Image: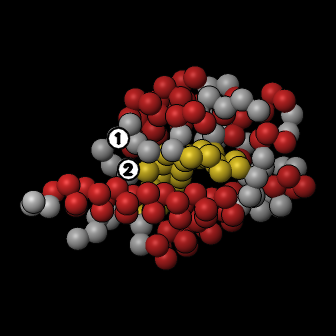
Amino acid sequence: MAKDFHILLLNGPNLNMLGTREPLFYDGLTLQDIVNQTSQKAKQLGVKLSHFQSNAEHELINEIHQAQGKIDFILINPAALTHTSVALRDAILSIAIPFYEIHLTNIYAREPFRHHSYLSDIANGVICGFRADGYIFALEAAVKFLFKIEELATIDESPT
């Protein structure tokens, strides 16, 4: 029997300004547009999606801590915290929940200070440069990952 998977979508600082912020980089979509599209896709895939956005690092960390034991997978666009936050990295490591790092733009094609991520080396995957579609790609990949893990667990539990 398939588990009811619960995925947490986290968005970091300034992503609440999408729609007015640098439209050439971000296609003019609002964060709510992206969340709505991703939520609709989650329903199609049969998974629960919760969303949280904050401009405050400590609020994102608290949300990550609260995910332990409740969330099966995290999709996170840490925004500028990607390049600065050891605390966010430590929070994710402390809960041992698989996650994908998402960026709307290709951070490696932008300013040099954006090329370093404190999360990429511990992420199950990184998706960047696909604009809003990256959220859908990440969600689809997360669902495949979770079903594969469930399938492997079922095989391990089968009598030999």
Q: Amino acid at mark 2?
A: Ile
* Local SS, label 1: loop
Identity of the residue furthest to the left in this view: 159
Left or right: where 152 falls relative to 132: left
Q: Residues within 10 Å of mark 2 (few under 14, many from 20)?
A: some
**Compared with residue 70, is residue 143 higher up or lower down, i.e. above or below?**
below
- Marks 1 and 2, how far apart in space? 6 Å
Image spot of residue 28 (x, y percent): 83, 61
- Which residue does the image show at 25% across and 55% down from the upper left? 153
User: Which residue in the protein does label 2 denote?
Assistant: 71
Picture quadrant where residue 133 is located: bottom right
Looking at the rendered image, the quarter that the N terminus falls into is bottom left
The dot on residue 7 is: none
Q: Residues within 10 Å of mark 1 (few under 14, many from 20)?
A: some
* Contact flag, marks 1 and 2 (Cβ < 8 Å): yes
- Which residue does the image show at 73% across and 42% down from the upper left? 14
- Which residue does the image show at 53% across and 40% down from the upper left? 123
User: Which residue in the protein does label 1 denote?
Assistant: 68
Depth check: give the residue in front, 102 or 33: 102
**Compared with residue 160, is residue 58 higher up or lower down, i.e. above or below?**
above
Left or right: where 36 falls relative to 79: left
Looking at the rendered image, the quarter that the C terminus falls into is bottom left
Q: Amino acid at mark 1?
A: Gln
Image spot of residue 99 (x, y percent): 49, 45
Left or right: where 107 falls relative to 71: right
Residue 7 visible: yes
Residue 55 visible: no
Identity of the residue furthest to the bottom in this view: 44
